[in-house]
Image (cartoon, rainbow, N blue to C red):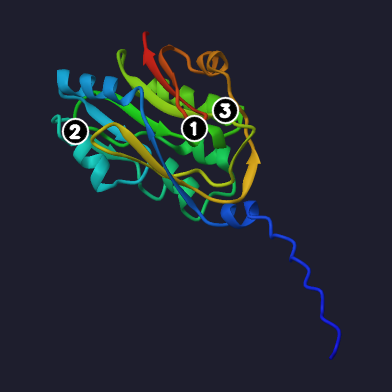
Amino acid sequence: MPPARLKFKEKPTPTTEIELSVPRTHNVHSGIFPIIRDILDQKQISVLDLGPPTSKKYRYLCGSGARVYWDNTPGSISNAFHGPGVDDFPTFLSDWGPPKLDGPLGLILAWIYFDYMELEDLQLWFTKLNESVAIGSRVYFLIHHAAHIPDSAPLFDVELDDVLRYNTDSVRREAPRHPPKQLEQLMPGFEIEKLFLMSNGLQEHLFYKKH
């Protein structure tokens, strides 16, 4: 009888890389969107969403009677990050301007794009923004506080129960981790109105134009 062969237990395959190679969907409760909903309910204002349009965002924002505009043209911020991209981002920003709106712009949803801009680009964008909005306008955005962020800017959606939903890819880059006071210094005329640290390491910001 031939000798029995010893069976060695195979070394387990690390699962981290396999899990990260698959895009993940995240759901997290927003601490600022209830405030935004109250603002929208108080008066009719125009909302500029720098992300692509979705039916869920439309239901959330338009349910209060707000006029919603999506900056989703070939020369938009959203297209720069989710479209074919741009070769010279500062030049792109210098040519950027909010679309023509029917009434005063009361809220801008900038989502996560600030995490993917250089500080010089942010300063340029904030300067152009300051020239385009009136006193009382608000800017909403998120900043990663983790050490690394997805290589591509996630796309965000919002549910009627103030839950944000977004997908992340597997590739990571170092996070800039902009502190709120640094962003406030870059935003002439704006001040911090509300900060909210979410359970997933994202921090929500709501800035208010005071002058």
- Counting from the top left corner in percent of width and height, residue 104 is at 23, 23
Q: Is 27 displayed left or right of 67 in the figure?
A: right
Q: Which is closer to the viewer, label 2 or label 1?
A: 1
> Where does label 3 land, which residue?
145
At x 74%, y 65%, the residue is: 9
> Where does label 2 land, which residue?
67
Secondary structure under tag 2 reads strand
- Answer with mark 2 or mark 1, whichever residue precedes in sequence: 2
- Counting from the top left corner in percent of width and height, residue 134 is at 31, 17
Q: Is 69 displayed left or right of 131 in the figure?
A: left
Mark 2 surroundings: few (<14), some (14-19) or many (≥20) residues within 10 A: many
Secondary structure under tag 1 reads loop
- Counting from the top left corner in percent of width and height, residue 185 is at 54, 13
At x 75%, y 62%, the residue is: 11
Looking at numbered disc 1 in the image, what kind of residue is underneath it? Asn
- Answer with mark 2 or mark 3, whichever residue precedes in sequence: 2
Hey, which quadrant is residue 136 in on the image?
top left
- The CA span between labels 1 and 3 is 9 Å
- The CA span between labels 2 and 1 is 31 Å
Q: Which is closer to the viewer, label 2 or label 3?
A: 3
Whether 196 is drawn above or below 154: the answer is: above
Secondary structure under tag 3 reads loop
Residues at discs 2 and 1 in contact (Cβ within 8 Å)? no
Hey, which quadrant is residue 133 in on the image?
top left
Looking at numbered disc 3 in the image, what kind of residue is underneath it? His
> Where does label 1 land, which residue?
200
- Answer with mark 1 or mark 3, whichever residue precedes in sequence: 3
